Amino acid sequence: MPQQNSKKKNNSGSKKMVDVSLLEQVTPLAQQINCLDIERISEICVEKIPALVGGSFASLYIFDETSNILHLQKHNHPFLVNKIVSLNQNPPSMMAMAIRSKELILVGDIENHTKPIIKEPQRIFSKNYKTKNCVIAPLICQDKVVGILNLADNTKPEGFSNEDIALIELLCQLSGASIGNIKLFEKIQHQASTDGLTGLVNHKTFYEILESELWRSRRYGGIISLIMIDADNLKTINDTYGHRTGDKAIKKVSQKINECIRQIDTAARYGGDEFAIILPNTSLTDATVVAERIVESVSNSFIKFEKERISLSVSVGLGQYGANANPEDITSRSDQALYTAKQAGKNTIRIFESPNSIVAIGAKEDSA
C-alpha cells in the first residue's frame, strides 16, 4: 500500500509539472497573439502552435467574406500550397466545410474519415504528408469566420490528442479575436480616409497623398499631373429629381473615373460635385489622354429616374507640375482650368499652361 500511494503521488506530481510547463508555454503565446500585427499572429499560428501540439506542417488563411475567398497568409510547407481557395469550388474543400460548420475538423485518418466524408479530389494535398492526420480549425470573431488554421502530420502514435485539440481551440479563439480586431481597425482606417458615397479617397487624404507624391518627386525626380473634374448639371439633377438621384449621378461619375485610371493614380472626391486625380510621373500629354477618356466614358453613360434616362457629362481642368510646386498652387491652377472648361460650355477639357494661358486641346490659347 505505501508503494502504491507513492506511485500515485509521483504520477500526480509529474502531471502537475507537465501542466505547469504547458501553462508556461501557452501564457506568453496568448499574450503575443493579443495584438494588431498580422505578421506576428501568422508566425505564432504557423511556427509556434505546431511546435506546441506536434504538427509538422501548418498554413494560415485569411477569409474575405465579401468575395467568399480564402487568401494564404503564411505557411511552412516545403511544397506548393494554394494561395487562393474559393468557397464556391465543387467539391468543397475541407476549409470550406470548416467555415460553413464553424467547427474544428479533426481527421485521424483522412482516407477513412466519415464526418464529413472527404473525397479523393478534396485531399490531393494529403499525399505530401507522412501521416494521415490533420486539423482544420476555423478562426472566429463575434460568430464570424475570419480565417482558417490548418495543421497536419502529427507524428505521435496517437496523432492529435484531446489535450492538443483543447490547446488548438483556445489559441485559435485568441487568434480569431485578434484577426477580427485587425479587420475592424482596417475598416475604421479605410472609412476615415475614404468618401462614404463613392469609395474614393476623401479631401483630407487627397492632400496627404499629394504631399507624399511631391516629396517623392523632390527626392527621386519626376513630375505630377493633376486632373480636376466637375460633374455637370448636378444642381439641376438634385432640384429636378431629388438628392438621391444626384447621389446616383455622383456614384456613376466616380465609377467611370476609377475605370479610366491606373492603380498608381489616386482619385478623390474633392468635395460636392468635384473630383481630383493625382497622376504621379505622368506627362501633360498622357494626362490629357486620361482626361479625354474620362469625358468620353461619362458622356456615354447615364442614370435612371423611374423610366427616364438622365444623361451625364463632366468638365475637366488639368495641368503638369514640377516637384517644387506646393499642393495649394497645384490644385488652384488645375481648378482654374476647370472653371474655364465650365465657362466654355461644359463636357470639355481645358489645360493649364501658365497663369496667363489656359488652352483647349489642340488650341493655341483659350483664355487667361
Image: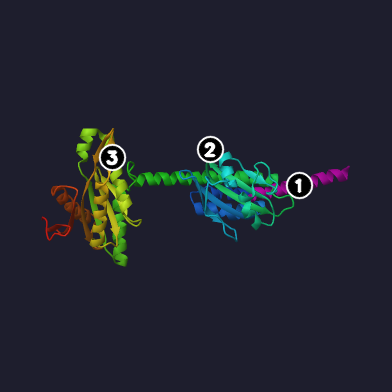
Is 153 included in the stretch rendered in magenta?
Answer: no
Judged left or right of residue 28, residue 281 is: left
Q: Which residues are magenta?
A: 1-25
Between marks 1 and 2, how big is the CA–CA gap? 39 Å
For label 3, the crowd category at 10 Å Cα-Cα, with few meaning under 14, some 14 to 19 and many 20 or more, is: some
Residue matched to label 2 = 143
Looking at the image, tell me whether mark 3 or mark 1 is earlier in sequence order: 1
Tell me what residue is drawn at x 54 percent, y 44 percent: 176
Is 4 included in the stretch rendered in magenta?
Answer: yes
Q: Is residue 249 above or below residue 28?
A: above
Of the residues shown, which amino acid type is indicated by label 1?
A: Gly
> Which disc, if any, is residue 13?
1
Between marks 3 and 2, how big is the CA–CA gap? 39 Å
Q: Position of residue 136 (x, y in %)?
A: 61, 47
Looking at the image, tell me whether mark 1 or mark 2 is earlier in sequence order: 1
For label 1, the crowd category at 10 Å Cα-Cα, with few meaning under 14, some 14 to 19 and many 20 or more, is: few
Q: Is residue 276 above or below residue 103?
A: below
Residue depth check, mark 3 versus mark 1: number of the one nearer the observer: 3
Q: Position of residue 58 (x, y in %)?
A: 60, 54
Residue matched to label 3 = 303
**Residues at circles 1 and 2 in contact by the CB criterion of under 8 Å:** no
Judged left or right of residue 344, residue 54 is: right
Of the residues shown, which amino acid type is indicated by label 2?
A: Asp
Of the residues shown, which amino acid type is indicated by label 3?
A: Ile
